[in-house]
């Protein structure tokens, strides 16, 4: 991270098998898919509306029309929350898998989901009736606490943090927070309310929530793009990275901060949804290669599109009721996780 020339030399060891033109087309395809999914998200729901009506509500808003009110107050912020959360989870997963060299890394691995759920349980019991902004911030703080404790536990060794220790620390913190959260929900009668939030939903997303998380989202995304080259080299191994003069500790600190910001925003918006950060980066590596300058932006676009499509599916599967996002991603993610784990099992021996 000293000079651009040296960074270019470091990433020169990564072969670009497909080229920038291929990446541009792939990214353009993702943007098109995202735009189509946004149009469908605004149109489909418990009460379907035509694309013409959705277009008119956006560019020729009439406050007296109920359909326009629904689109502006409910569907657009909901779709925006889907996009932001999907981008956050996908990029966070890509960054984690890169700098930890752990193919099973996901935001849930760091105790982020469990920390946010515990913070929500505490809020429901001791701070009932709080504004959405307060609840959002408390969830964000809980996510940060979970991540911090996971990294602290994984680093409590002279040889430093390793992918194996990170996995074990994440599991330990998740189990600890889960046990405390269950105790609180059972003893204070908040099990139903907590279960609704932890199942994953953006049904109640508001413009206020979107405005609150945008600075954190942009900050985490900017940090991820800033260290993309360094992550590419670090993913080759710490010894190789040291040979190129890379500041490994600094890169890991920035990467940790980026993951914390992105995962915290996602969990605060949609709840503790897993597997998005596992699925998307693996698919992106298959299509664009192993250079994180390509993986991170591609993960952002396709992660946002995947979340929007999953939310649409959740609205249509059991109309007029909705299927939780957590259920949809569990159905997709568990088989994917088992497939990746079976291929990478030797890495943990």
Image (spheres, rainbow, N blue to C red):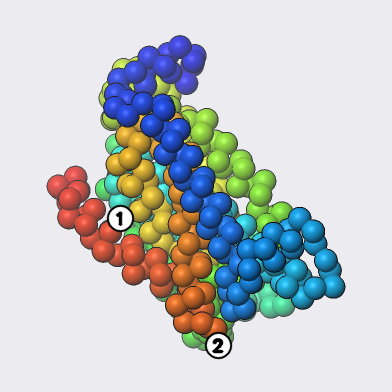
Across and down, in percent, residue 191 comes to 51, 83
Q: Position of residue 79 (x, y in %)?
A: 60, 61
**Residue 19 location (% of width, % of height):** 36, 26
Residue corresponding to mark 2: 189
Q: Is residue 204 above or below residue 107?
A: below
Q: SS for tag 2?
A: loop
Sooner in the amino-acid sequence: mark 2 or mark 1: 1
Report the side of 202 relative to 215 (left or right): left
Can you see residue 101?
yes
The answer to whether residue 160 is visible is no
Say which of 158 and 231 sits in front: 231
Q: Which residue is mark 1?
A: 168
User: Is the residue marked by circle 1 packed among few (<14), some (14-19), or many (20+) residues within 10 Å?
Assistant: some
Q: Residue furthest top?
A: 5
Q: Is residue 9 left or right of residue 286?
A: right
Q: Residues within 10 Å of mark 2 (few under 14, many from 20)?
A: few
> Residue 95, relative to residue 63: is it above or below?
above
């Amino acid at each position: 991270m000293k000079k651009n020339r040296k960074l270019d030399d470091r990433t020169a060891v990564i072969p670009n098998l497909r080229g920038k033109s291929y990446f541009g087309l792939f990214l353009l395809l993702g943007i098109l898919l995202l735009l189509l999914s946004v149009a469908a998200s605004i149109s489909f729901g418990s009460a379907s509306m035509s694309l013409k009506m959705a277009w008119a509500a956006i560019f020729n808003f009439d406050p007296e029309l109920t359909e326009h009110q629904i689109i502006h107050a409910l569907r657009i912020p909901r779709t925006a929350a889907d996009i932001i959360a999907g981008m956050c989870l996908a990029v966070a997963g890509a960054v984690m898998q890169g700098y930890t060299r752990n193919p099973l890394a996901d935001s849930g691995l760091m105790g982020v989901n469990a920390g946010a759920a515990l913070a929500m349980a505490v809020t429901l019991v001791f701070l009932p009736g709080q504004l959405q902004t307060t609840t959002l911030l408390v969830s964000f703080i809980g996510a940060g606490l979970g991540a911090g404790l996971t990294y602290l536990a994984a680093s409590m060794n002279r040889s430093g943090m390793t992918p194996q220790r990170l996995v074990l620390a994440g599991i330990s913190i998740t189990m600890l927070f889960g046990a405390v959260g269950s105790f609180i929900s059972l003893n204070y009668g908040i099990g139903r309310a907590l279960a609704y939030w932890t199942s994953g939903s953006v049904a109640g997303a508001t413009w206020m929530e979107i405005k609150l998380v945008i600075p954190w989202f942009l900050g985490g995304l900017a940090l991820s793009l800033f260290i993309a080259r360094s992550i590419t080299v670090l993913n080759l191994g710490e010894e190789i990275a040291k040979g190129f003069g890379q500041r490994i500790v600094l890169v890991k600190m920035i990467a940790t901060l980026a993951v914390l910001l992105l995962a915290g925003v996602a969990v605060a918006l949609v709840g503790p949804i897993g597997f998005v950060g596992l699925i998307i980066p693996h698919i992106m590596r298959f299509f664009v290669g192993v250079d994180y300058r390509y993986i991170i932006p591609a993960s952002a676009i396709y992660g946002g599109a995947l979340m929007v499509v999953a939310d649409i599916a959740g609205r249509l599967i059991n109309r007029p009721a909705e299927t939780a996002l957590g259920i949809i991603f569990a159905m997709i993610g568990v088989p994917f996780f088992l497939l990746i784990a079976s291929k990478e099992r030797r890495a943990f021996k």
